[in-house]
């Protein structure tokens, strides 16, 4: 059976569907020789949507497929028929996925609840047909609009596991063994450093009275807060937990140094993590060296936190620890939910700039580029309307002040226009 690895980062490209074009059409019924305008609007493009799925626990599928495009809106038709809307594309991601705009780094969403959705690339609006431009003065307009292009961008996704309790500690402290003893999780276990390269989750049930999700997180190394080793891949998962179990390797003479280093890495990454409730599991009590160190460790560390002597290998003290953790969770507030993040939209500012590049005048700005892209220049009425709008926006006056001359090329978006006067 094929298995998929745990992946907690992904980069994907999303593109909303383009809007359909409006059309120029007129009524042609048998007994209406001079029918009015009847061109329908184009349909809106579809959206690209991210949805949090409780059945997923990895971003691996988004390493297999990285490009997603919603459907284009259908073009308008005669008899005032509006084109169909383009189909949406829904991308399912694990609960706990944080979404960033890859270019700007802006936070777009934190999908922390099952079923939560965010539109990450909106479809373009459909262009209007000529029926929409009819007035009492201009009853047969030959004007229609092209559809707007859909939004498009690269996204960076990060998964932060949603677990009640996180196991932290140096590599090979026994976290994976502890998780395997108290839950049905089957993490890979071996007797050498850096065994766990990915988080593992397990559900712990204590006598049917307490139940919580426990995460075995990769071991820390010095410098993790700055990204060394597994660095941030580990630490971002800790942020979600309500309680930490700090597993200490009782067989190591540097046990106190390890305790201090782990907490220092937490503090340097996020000072709030040091304030997170923490219980100490002094592991490997089945070994003589750990038994010899236990009295000193208990005397020193019990001043700061609750300390349990355990042996994950034999089960000694494990369930006393789990019962205490279950009881403590009942008194702790739920994990703070992320604040709502507004849907990120492309810049809507109406400004524009005029500059010369070689023999070409460039006019740049979202609103003016959108106007030019939507205009059907083959229709005289449409071209005249666009000219009036550009005059009202100040674009034509800005070109005159800049020194444009008859015969010069003016480029707006992907359209080249010739200046005639």
Image (cartoon, rainbow, N blue to C red):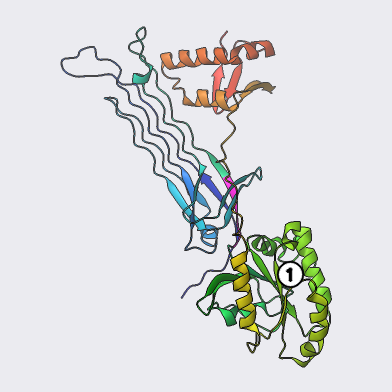
Which image quarter: residue 72? top left
Viewed as shown, does residue 296 lie left or right of 390?
right
What residue range appears in magenta? 154-161
The x, y position of residue 207, in whole percent, is 52, 80
Q: Which one is nearer the viewer's eye here, 310 or 376?
A: 310
Judge whether residue 159 is colored magenta.
yes
Mark 1, secondary structure of its residue:
loop
Q: How many labels does the image show?
A: 1
- Residue occupying image coordinates x 74% and y 78%: 248
Q: Mark 1 points at which residue?
A: 220
The x, y position of residue 251, in whole percent, is 77, 85
- Residue occupying image coordinates x 80% and y 65%: 264
- Vertical placement of 68 versus 350: above or below? below
Viewed as shown, does residue 74 lie left or right of 3?
left
- Residue occupying image coordinates x 43% and y 34%: 19
The residue lying furthest to the front in this view is: 331
The residue lying furthest to the left in this view is: 31
Q: Predominant secondary structure in magenta?
A: strand
């Amino acid at each position: 059976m094929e298995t998929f690895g745990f992946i907690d980062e992904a980069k994907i490209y999303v593109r909303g569907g383009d809007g359909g074009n409006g059309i120029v059409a007129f009524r042609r019924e048998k007994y209406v020789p001079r029918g009015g305008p009847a061109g329908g609007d184009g349909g809106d493009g579809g959206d690209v949507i991210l949805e949090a799925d409780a059945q997923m626990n990895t971003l691996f599928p988004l390493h297999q497929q990285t490009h997603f495009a919603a459907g284009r809106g259908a073009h308008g038709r005669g008899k005032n028929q509006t084109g169909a809307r383009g189909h949406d594309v829904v991308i399912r991601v694990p609960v706990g996925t944080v979404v960033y705009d890859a270019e700007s780094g802006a936070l777009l969403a934190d999908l922390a609840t099952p079923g939560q959705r965010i539109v990450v690339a909106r479809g373009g609006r459909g262009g209007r047909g000529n029926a929409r431009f009819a007035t009492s003065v201009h009853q047969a307009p030959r004007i229609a609009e092209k559809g707007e292009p859909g939004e498009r961008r690269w996204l960076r996704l990060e998964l932060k596991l949603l677990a009640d309790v996180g196991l932290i500690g140096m590599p090979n402290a026994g976290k994976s063994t502890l998780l395997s003893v108290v839950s049905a999780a089957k993490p890979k276990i071996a007797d050498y450093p850096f065994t766990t390269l990915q988080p593992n989750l397990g559900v712990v049930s204590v006598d049917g009275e307490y139940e919580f999700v426990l995460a075995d997180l990769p071991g820390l190394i010095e410098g993790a807060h700055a990204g060394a080793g597994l660095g941030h891949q580990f630490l971002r998962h800790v942020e979600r937990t309500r309680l930490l179990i700090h597993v200490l390797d009782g067989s190591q003479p540097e046990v106190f140094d390890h305790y201090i280093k782990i907490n220092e890495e937490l503090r340097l990454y996020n000072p709030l993590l040091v304030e997170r409730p923490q219980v100490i599991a002094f592991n490997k009590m089945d070994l003589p060296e750990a038994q010899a160190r236990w009295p000193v460790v208990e005397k020193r560390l019990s001043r700061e936190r609750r300390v349990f002597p355990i042996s994950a290998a034999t089960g000694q003290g494990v369930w006393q620890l789990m019962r205490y953790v279950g009881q403590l969770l009942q008194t702790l507030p739920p994990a703070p939910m992320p604040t709502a993040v507004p849907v990120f939209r492309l810049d809507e500012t109406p400004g524009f700039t005029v500059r010369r590049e070689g023999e070409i005048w460039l006019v740049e700005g979202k609103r003016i580029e959108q106007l030019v892209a939507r205009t059907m220049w083959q229709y005289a009425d449409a071209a005249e309307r666009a000219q009036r709008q550009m005059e009202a926006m100040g674009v034509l006056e800005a070109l005159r002040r800049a020194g444009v001359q008859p015969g010069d090329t003016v480029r707006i978006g992907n359209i080249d226009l010739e200046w005639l006067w």
